[in-house]
Image (cartoon, rainbow, N blue to C red):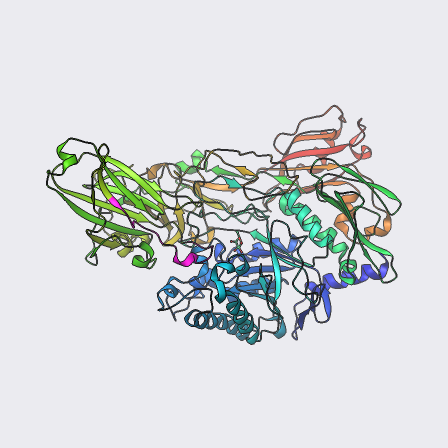
Amino acid sequence: MGESAVGLGLLLLLALTTSFCSGANVTYDHRALVIDGRRRLLISGSIHYPRSTPEMWPDLIQKSKEGGLDVIETYVFWNLHEPVRGQYDFEGRNDLVKFVKVVQDAGLLVHLRIGPYACAEWSYGGFPLWLHFIPGIVFRSDNEPFKAEMKRFTAKIVDLMKQENLYASQGGPIILSQVENEYGNVQSAYGSSAKPYINWAAAMATSLDTGVPWVMCQQNDAPDPIINTCNGFYCDQFTPNSNKKPKMWTENWSGWFSSFGDPLPYRPVEDLAFAVARFFQLGGTFQNYYMYHGGTNFGRSAGGPFITTTYDYDAPIDEYGLLRQPKWGHLRDVHKAIKLCEAAILATDPTTSYPSPNLEVTVYKTGSGRCAAAFLANIGTKSDATVNFNGNSYTVPAWSVSILPDCKNVVLNTAKINAISTVPKFVRYSSKERAEAKDGFQSGWSWIVEPVGISNKNAFTKPGLQEQINTTADQSDYLWYSLSAAINGNETFIKDGSKTLLHIDSLGHALFVFVNGKLVGSGKGRNSDQKVSIDIPLSIQPGNTKIDLLSMTVGLRNYGAFFDTVGAGVTGPVQLKSSQNGLLIDLSSQQWTYQIGMQGEDSKLYHGDSSIWVTQPTLPTNQPLVWYKTTFDAPTGSNPVALDFTGMGKGQAWVNGQSIGRYWPTNIASGGSCTDSCNYRGPYKADKCLTNCGKPTQHIYHVPRSWLKPSGNILVLFEEAGGDPTKLSFVARETRSVCSHVSESHPLPVEMWSLDDEIRNRTRSTLSLTCPSPDQVISKIKFASFGTPRGACGSFRHGECRSKRALSVVRKACVGSRSCSIGVSSTTLGEACGVSRSLAVEASCA
Ligand code: GAL
């Protein structure tokens, strides 16, 4: 890369951090988005504003910026902003304008995916449920009532942004907007209505005159001028539907979401980095991590059904806002390496050659035909390869890309991680702090027992079994189905002494069955199959048998053709049947009495302020349907905090009146093929790399610090199944160790150094360590070895070769400071044998 290209690169970098004072013209051509006449290579990341708190936003955005992002992407969640038709809410976590301004203040750009269909594992895909009750409506189709509402809301958001001058065309940060979401994946199910709908959506969006381009993701037939973009684990092979549109990747899934009952997915960073590098190698110019920070599904916002309250997503910034290392750091390095190639990538189209089936050598050339930047990819999954390129020979490990911004020096290989690693843990508050009630609950527990069955005067009776979502309109997770079954004793199977079964078929999502006031059985579905079908043995006596079925939704469906019409609840049949002779009494069409929601919800017990809480005679535990309340002081320190729900069953929890979400620690992840060290080589899919098999899918729940005051906080739980609240504890998210493992390698030639300080330092082989929190220092070096050390962070061990001085050198350089750097060479660390030597260090931070 010549000096002028370097200069251009710096200019572009500068331009990225400047906001558009007088308004920028955003267009596109076949290579890239074009802002004020200049093509841009943009790295983007998804952060959904309501999945964290406004107090967390500035730090999340700052960490995104330091990670090398140019753009923050978010969906807009219609059901948050318009919970009741015509009544809008843009306060607190819903303050979209504030979020966009926080991004702007950090000097970053925004991609606003208005949708208004979001998907996003968000309840009902982001649609407000009242939409469903509009007569004649058919969602996401060429249907007048739907289009009218979609247009009204989309225009409302666009107007809101315009009023605040937030579009780039007005000097704001928004450079891009999305309409619809992955409609192409489901559109065949909508038949002849699909195409007119998509054409209408495109025209409607364009007519709103935002001054910035619109995209549709996974929509191959997106009409001009809408750009069709790619979503997936890999998008290197994607081509847009016109040679006038750039190659854009709106969702690079950095991990995957989790569901109650399933193990936790993770995506190795080597594979993610490989996917990113290959996309830019093969001509991409806009890439977005879905998610960069996943966050938390507070309240009842989780979709699914069965999406967990955590939406951590194995993202580069974890649910709690802490850097996930080495993921965040390695991607930052990848971004830097790609940015070194930016001018070359934007100037021209790539040329790729294939020296062998698994090798791809891509060159970006200057106008005069000279190589300006190169990428060497080995897409084989087994063996490292040697690539002869430009007069040199390069070893490219399996499933990796080497990046050569000057066509000569490898500044980064996606499989070689130089970033630090950390292993954050949830730490229980010490017994001293607990004794001082610093992990809370100093007042003990009070409670209110929720009645089984009908207790509300608004209950109503209807013949037959009603579908749940149409009945509750999602005002609550809960619907009671109650019946008094008259058994006269003459029923054949009761007379002949056969065993009786209560058979229930439900569309899901979860069900508790009470007979004569006692919990006799329960059932639950899963994300893959929400239905519940159970047979409960009963001993039935002549007389009236009271059957109370508590049916629960666990987040409304968010994906699939006509997902909005998928029902829930006990739609039957419900039968009493003989286990032996097949005879039965069908209760399905009898007169059932219904109650929407719990009495405690009606009286807003979650605020914790009513006077009806009791503390006598003894705390009920392991008993269904109990509201619990306690008060607590905020845990000490500034680390993120969470509640460990071990000991509880299933329910919802509120802190100072704000819902921290649904808890369900008794829902155990299925067993199977979990591994903590998944082989990153080879195509990734959502169930390739899993942890946590056989353990609760989620037992730890985020309590945002900003929701707490120093003392007198109120925690309210509604326990559905039965649990023991005295087992609950506060935990802090802490990182007490940082590690780094860096190999000794040859420095880059001097002319490369001016490109970027960090890469210069790294390629001179420097190991750097930094404690994550500003109030921590390195207190101890737990391990240091220069030579051929092995293992991973937390389990490093010496190899055959090691220098004697490494530990003392590292100690001297690091202990007592928050950060330190050590040159990785025998000059600094002492002689060691071995050909490819490295330095591995694990340090304690306190
Ligand atoms: C995509 C969708 C996103 C999200 C993702 C899975 O298909 O567009 O909104 O649901 O899948 O996390």
| Residue for point 35% across, 40% down | 649
Residue 389 coordinates in the image, percent (x, y): 85, 46
Vertical placement of 558 versus 538: above or below?
below
| Residue for point 74% across, 23% down | 800
Which residue is nearer to you in this view: 97 or 356? 356
Which residue is nearer to you in this view: 311 or 99? 311
Q: Which SS type dominates the magenta stretch?
A: loop
Q: Is residue 620 visible?
A: no
Residue 639 coordinates in the image, percent (x, y): 51, 45
Which residue is nearer to you in this view: 738 or 690? 690
Vertical placement of 60 versus 24: above or below?
above
Question: Which part of the image, by quadrant, shows the N terminus?
Answer: bottom right
Question: Which of the 4 image quarters holds residue 802?
Answer: top right
Q: What is the magenta range? A: 557-574
Question: Which part of the image, by quadrant, shows the C terminus?
Answer: top right
Is 240 left or right of 701, judged from the image as shown?
right
Is 750 left or right of 232, judged from the image as shown?
right
Residue 425 coordinates in the image, percent (x, y): 53, 38
Question: Which of the 4 image quarters holds residue 171?
Answer: bottom right
